[in-house]
Image (cartoon, grey):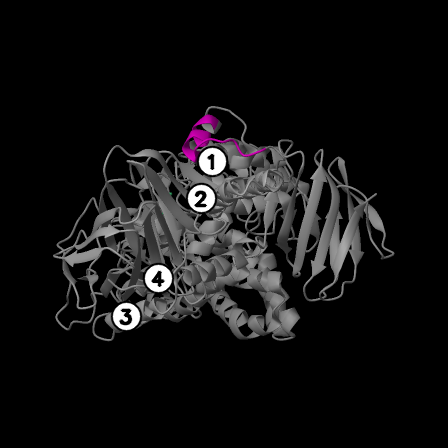
Amino acid sequence: MVSLKYCQHQSKVSMDFLNRSIAVVEQLIKSKMIYFMRVFVLIFCLFSQVAFAQQKENLLWYNKPAKDWNEALPIGNGRLGAMIFGGVAEELIQLNEETLWTGGPVDPNPNPDAPKYLEPVRNALFNDSIGKAVQLLRKMQGPNTEMYQPLGDIIIRQKFEGEPKDYRRDLDISTAIATTSFTADGVHYIREMFSTAVDQVMILRLSASKKGALNFSVKNQHELAFQSFVNNENELVLRGKARITNDERRNPKPIIFTDERNEDGMRFEWRVKVISNDGTLTTDSLLNISNASEVVLLISAATSYNGYDRFPDKDGKDEKAEVQKYINGAMVKSYNQIRKNHISDYSKYFNRLNLSLTSLPVPDLPTDERLRLYKAGTADPKLEELYFNFGRYLLISSSRPGGIPANLQGIWNPLIRPSWRSNYTTNINVQMNYWPAEMLNLSELTEPLIEQTKRWAHNGAATAKNYYNMKGWALHHNSDIWAQTNPVGEGGGDPKWANWSLGSPWISQHLFEHYRFTSDKKYLKEVAYPLMKGATEFCLDWLVEKDGKLITAPSTSPENVYLHPNGFKGTVTIASAMDMEIIWDLFTNMIEASEVLGVDKEYAAMLAKKRDMLSPLKIGKKGNLVEWFGDWEDEDPQHRHVSHLFGLHPGRQISPLLDQKYADASRKTLEVRGDGGTGWSKAWKINFWARLLDGNHAYKMYQELLKGSTLNNLFDTHPPFQIDGNFGAISGIGEMLLQSHLDAVQLLPALPDAWKDGHVTGMIARGSFEVDMFWKNGKLTKAFITSKVGNPIQLRSNQKIKVKGLKVKSSPAKVNNDTQYITSFDTKAGRKYEIIVE
Ligand code: FUC
């Protein structure tokens, strides 16, 4: 075994502290220094309580192993992920690597016949021949996307004497470290695991409180064909290949790993290296460790993925060399060094924001038990905080600069045929993943999405041209690591999802939002604006003029079905509200961007004219916001998508601060839709209600999500697990506390009665301001605004405020029956302003 220098356990800082302190106390007793001992015990008690209290805040913990994947605990460094089950005699750790996908680069023109159907589709729609339009749209479809794949499993079989007791497993989301521990026959065993972005390895340390008491074996496995062996370095190696084809559980295809030219079929490899100071290692097909005291398993993985446009087999990276590189890099460092670097890297993101919703202590119960009680109606604001922080943990662990965006399951997927291929769905899901990033002070983590957008723009230009003969770039409803952009469905998909075509304008919103939060003009000029302009070009070509209005045709309202007054059901129509709102949003952003950059003045004026011609928002007979071209009923009035409220959130076209009648219509729409839905649907509704400035209803939706759509490991469930709900929910909480989409920075816009006293520090508002807020009895008591770049600011608050040291006036503004206050002032970059409530 390789030996590596590392000092005693530090995983449980407070446990260690306890042990060391006991030793000191014993010393003191021996030397009869009773007086000093008393003083010491007092100080120790004080400190250890602080340590425990701090740790418990951000801890998911359980007193039994996971019974299934939905109870296992996720760790990740953006690229390497694991789900830890915490088994005692048999531990299962299921692994992922973010680039392991089926297939290879896209065919830019898979359906050369597609363009010829566009005019007939439009004619059919204009003649209300919806059946015919659907039939024709199927002919305009292309291949389905590829699928995200599992990397394989590690199985650890541990031998010990006696019955295991004092079992516990936890995930500390303040350090991103998972720990499993138990006692057997008087020996305390601890397993500590994390995935570090610094060294690109996962590391698992097993230890026993008694010298030489560790006896276990390590095995690897994969559901598909693989090679496994122990190499000369005593590393357990698993080598495999991803399939070249994709399929679905309900329609499996034969498993094929290679094409004739060895182009596709991603290669992958992962290794487990054993490092220990004592004990013995024997190898057969397994690593067998006996009589060790402390063992570190160094795990790294790589695939041959070499970019979205390169064949992963033929032109793939040397994955073996990559794995070797990571292992070699980590080998020269001590465990404690790796651990320390990991914590400081992770906490530089995590510690930026702090939310407190209560001064109550954390209930001393396992997380699953707390969730069970919450579902039964017991209030637990600490659980609401924990879920919020867990969402931030998940984003930091699944989306890191240099990587690819978090997919439908972030980076955690155990299945070779995952639901919805664990891909990117662009009609809500992938966007929802990134809603919280900017405002929760994780702006850098949007980099993978921005980079992916460049790839979409490249492939999407071919799709716009080859499918529609149009300019710009198009992105349809599904995508993958290969940045596929064509309509999916393979001729059999329902157009209500497969042919949805407005991915490029929607994703462009994220490009502009990144600018709005960071004020980074260089980025706006060089990256965002050209991509946004490409999406605009597509939209301009895609719009059709009809009766003096600009409309889209074909159009859907994902993935809903209408009941036409003429007695037929339909999915495809013209000018759905969502289409109009998305295009309104892009044109508005383009107009603002061109102004900021001082470019394309005439172009912007043309866009403003076109924006005015867009088919307008309508209010229906029920007082609802109309979803379809006409005020038609829905087949399912409680449908999970609420696409037509795009303008309320994530857009900025509808707001009670702009025009109460559309806000009221949105409220009515939400009332008709109800408070149910899938996990992500409830998450979206938190955001909607927050934007309607109804904190209590937003909070109700948060409760609905926690009660009805949350698994024991706090993953969101559709069902099954989808990470979008986790991210959408924490975005909603952000919207309850701070809004800035209408240029003013609104403090505590939708605080619910349930969160009477609290504070949040480190949130970000558009215009590049860092905001800290403190409140009592539901009212703001104090705030701090740090101006990052020196933009002028307009604050909107429910109370009259002053700015310490500045002569500013807080002027009243009526919103419905409430009075709000507007306070404007210039700021200096880097200066922190104290806001005092009068
Ligand atoms: C959209 C939703 C589904 C699911 C899928 C991944 O198509 O309508 O509910 O979330 O994405």
Measure the C-alpha gap from mark 4 to mark 3: 11 Å
Q: Tell which tag, 3 or 1, sits nearer the viewer.
A: 3
Whether residue 715 is in magenta: the answer is: no
**Looking at the image, which is closer to me, 351 or 820?**
351
What is the x, y in percent for residue 297?
Answer: 29, 57
Q: Quadrant of residue 602?
A: bottom right
| Disc ID at residue 725 | 2
| Contact between labelled residues 1 and 2, with CB atoms less than 8 Å apart | yes
Relative side of 742 to 377, left or right: right
What is the x, y in percent for residue 361?
Answer: 58, 33
Say which label, 4 or 1, has the lower sequence index.
4
Residue 510: tell me if it is visible. Answer: yes
Mark 2: give few (<14), some (14-19) or many (20+) Cα within 10 Å: many
Measure the C-alpha gap from mark 2 to mark 1: 8 Å
Measure the C-alpha gap from mark 3 to mark 1: 43 Å
Which residue, given by chain and number where applicable, does mark 4 sit on?
Answer: 201
What is the x, y in percent for residue 378?
Answer: 51, 25
Which residue, given by chain and number where applicable, does mark 1 sit on?
Answer: 705
Which residue, given by chain and number where applicable, does mark 3 sit on?
Answer: 324
Viewport quadrant of the C terminus: top right
Residue 627: tell me if it is visible. Answer: no
